Image (cartoon, rainbow, N blue to C red):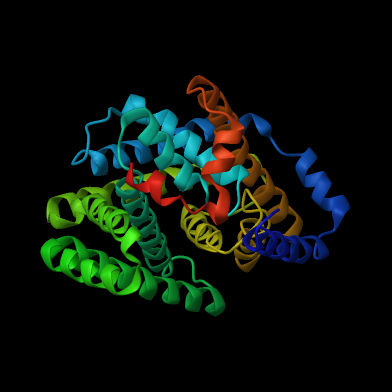
Amino acid sequence: MRSWKFWLGVLVSAFFVWLTARGLEWGEFYSALRGARYEWLLPAILVYFAAVWARTWRWHYMLRHMKQVSVMRLFPVVVIGYMGNNVYPARAGEVIRSYVLKKKEGVSVSASLATVALERLFDGLVMCAFVFFALPFAPLPPVYRNVVVGFSLLFFAVLIVFLLLATNPDRTDLIAARMINALLPQRFRPQATELASKFLVGLHALRSPRELFMILLTSVAIWLTETGKYWVIAHAFPALQVNFMVLMLMTAVVNLATTLPSAPGYVGTFDKPGIEILKAFGQPANIAAAYTIVLHVALWLPITLLGFVFMAQESLRWRELEIVTRDESTPTPAMLTD
């Protein structure tokens, strides 16, 4: 039985797909697809995997307090995680990634999930920074600007909370113990205490200004490289006339939009905002739609296929991943604390 979160995601995606489809002139849309220069996809995919490699290095850097895992060994784990995000709802790939890391390297799931949460936090902050940096060169419509301001406040609030947790470990342990003792039955307290302790280990990188700077710098490099993929694929559509700043805005807005509930692969929630950004900068709707959909497929398909390959190499079974992602992608206490 599918969870309510799955069906909510399907409904949200269906709504965004309907919004996208109703504004298209289908003949012109197909003409734009037929006229695209698909030879640009190969260099774009190579650029994208350079960004994935940079993501892997960032995770390697954040994990090193728990265990030194080489980037080469970590890369398949990251790819499997992104494959999971693409084929399961609710970003279940993040849990899959931590599960595979525990299975392969023995790193606690709760601790590695804390590093994944930090990754997402810094990604969000960089996306918001992209918008504010690009605004003088490519003004954003007010409705999107207000959304970005809201996200910025949220991300900074979460960062402050994480900083307080990481820099005051003794006090945090005390508060966590009091909350666990007050809220949970006796039989669950040891596991919950261990889970909280390991989660704090995952936040270790926040204790050092140097490490904070390295994570932020790497995050900026990752997203500039990913924007490079958007820019390369834009060359496949000669009628698309946009500069790098507009594509920075698009990168930021569509990736913030994918935090909304959606069907697996961010169907609709990626496409509609991307099309609207391009239209806001004077691009024809059908060209914008053709470009955005080709971009989406080029982001989704290669890493998903490579994820299947790595999944087979790691002897992972679909049934195993289904168990990991059950109960709305929430890992069981036993899995978290092993």
Which residue: 42% across, 76% down? Answer: 149
Which residue: 52% across, 61% down? Answer: 259
> Is residue 7 left or right of 120 when viewed as pictured?
right
> Is residue 209 left or right of 114 when viewed as pictured?
left
> Which is nearer the eye, 262 or 320?
320
> Which is nearer the eye, 204 or 223?
204
Q: Is residue 327 above or below residue 31?
A: below
Query: Could you tell me residue 47's position as x and y percent?
Result: 47, 35
Query: Could you tell me residue 24's position as x and y percent?
Result: 81, 60
Extreme top residue here? 313
Q: Is residue 165 above or below residue 311?
A: below
Which quadrant is the C terminus positioned in?
A: top left
Does residue 125 appear in this view? yes
Locate residue 163: give its quadrant: bottom left
Which residue: 22% across, 66% down? Answer: 177
Does residue 235 appear in this view? no
> Is residue 8 left or right of 122 when viewed as pictured?
right
Which residue: 74% across, 66% down? Answer: 15
Query: Could you tell me residue 80's position as x and y percent?
Result: 49, 34
> Which is nearer the eye, 117 or 183?
183
Query: Could you tell me residue 141's position as x and y percent?
Result: 55, 75
